[in-house]
């Protein structure tokens, strides 16, 4: 039987690859260091990474998002990685996160992937929970969430990091 992947699944797999790479970078950072926002762009079989070093993290993120317009007509796939903070609705507590925005032709909006983590500067780099996946601003649910989580997992595996050993396990 012939299976085709949707643009969302393609973006999720590529986003998983970039997420795993970002986790590797984050696992090596020292106190006060953040992931430099960067994009990974694949076009015509060639992959390139573009780093966004600006005066502030906010300016770097704005520049990276703006560059999407520059690359989207020539890119076969695109993912943008950065670090941020996340809090659950109604909670004042903030958690460090790696944020990935990924896109493939045929999509109208980016696919979002958020992975909570404990920074290396704490002395114990750990990934917290599973990646959260967002489609058109809403967390994926049901069969869509299952398909996209599998695609993100394939991308993570393709990157070949210590992902499983970084996972936080409840005692």
Image: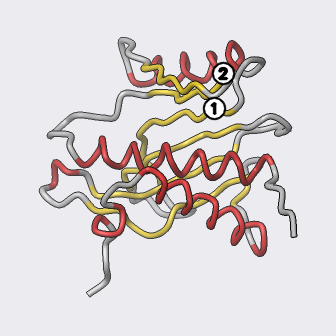
Q: Are marks 1 and 2 in contact (CB under 8 Å)?
A: yes
Quadrant of the rendered structure where residue 68 is? top right
- Category of crowding for the residue at label 2, using alpha-carbon neighbours closer than 10 angstroms: few (below 14), some (14–19), many (at least 20): some
> 133 or 137, which is in the foreground?
133
Is residue 66 positioned above or below 78 on the image?
above
Residue 8 - label: none
**Whole-percent x and y of residue 42?**
61, 28
Q: Which residue is mark 1?
A: 78
Q: Residue at x 73, y 56 (%)?
A: 138
Q: Secondary structure at mark 2?
A: helix
Tell me if residue 62 comes above or below residue 147 in the rendering.
above
- Horizontal relation, residue 136 to residue 58: left or right: right
Label 1 Cα crowd, 10 Å radius (few <14 / some 14-19 / many 20+): many
Q: Secondary structure at mark 1?
A: strand
Q: Is residue 158 above or below residue 55?
A: below
* Count of marks overlaid on the render: 2
The reply, left or right, for residue 55 in relation to residue 42 is left
Residue drawn at point x = 72 percent, y = 67 percent: 147
Q: Residue furthest bottom?
A: 171
Q: Which of label 1 and label 2 is nearer to you?
A: 1
Cα separation, mark 1 vs mark 2, equals 8 Å
Which residue is tagged 2?
A: 68
Query: Could you say which quadrant of the image residue 21 lies in?
Result: top left
Q: What colour-coding does the image apply? A: secondary structure
Percent x, y for residue 82? 45, 36
Q: Quadrant of the N terminus?
A: bottom right
Of all residues, the one furthest to the left in this rendering is 123
Q: Is residue 21 left or right of residue 16?
A: left
Q: Position of residue 157 (x, y in %)?
A: 47, 59
Residue at 68 percent of width and 45 percent of height: 11
In primary-sequence order, the first of circles 1 and 2 is: 2
Image quarter in which the C terminus is found: bottom left
């Amino acid at each position: 039987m012939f299976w085709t992947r949707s643009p969302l699944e393609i973006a999720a797999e590529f986003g998983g690859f970039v997420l795993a790479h970002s986790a590797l970078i984050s696992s090596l950072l020292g106190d006060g260091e953040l992931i430099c926002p960067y994009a990974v762009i694949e076009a015509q079989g060639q992959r390139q990474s573009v780093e966004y070093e600006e005066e502030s993290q906010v300016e770097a993120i704005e520049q990276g998002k703006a560059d999407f317009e520059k690359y989207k007509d020539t890119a076969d796939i695109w993912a943008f990685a950065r670090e941020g903070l996340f809090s659950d609705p109604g909670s004042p507590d903030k958690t460090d996160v790696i944020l990935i925005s990924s896109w493939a032709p045929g999509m109208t909006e980016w696919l979002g992937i958020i992975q909570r983590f404990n920074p290396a500067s704490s002395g114990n780099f750990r990934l917290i929970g599973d990646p959260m996946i967002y489609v058109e601003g809403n967390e994926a649910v049901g069969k869509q969430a299952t398909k996209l989580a599998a695609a993100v997992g394939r991308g993570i595996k393709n990157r070949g990091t210590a992902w499983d050993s970084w996972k936080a396990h409840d005692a």
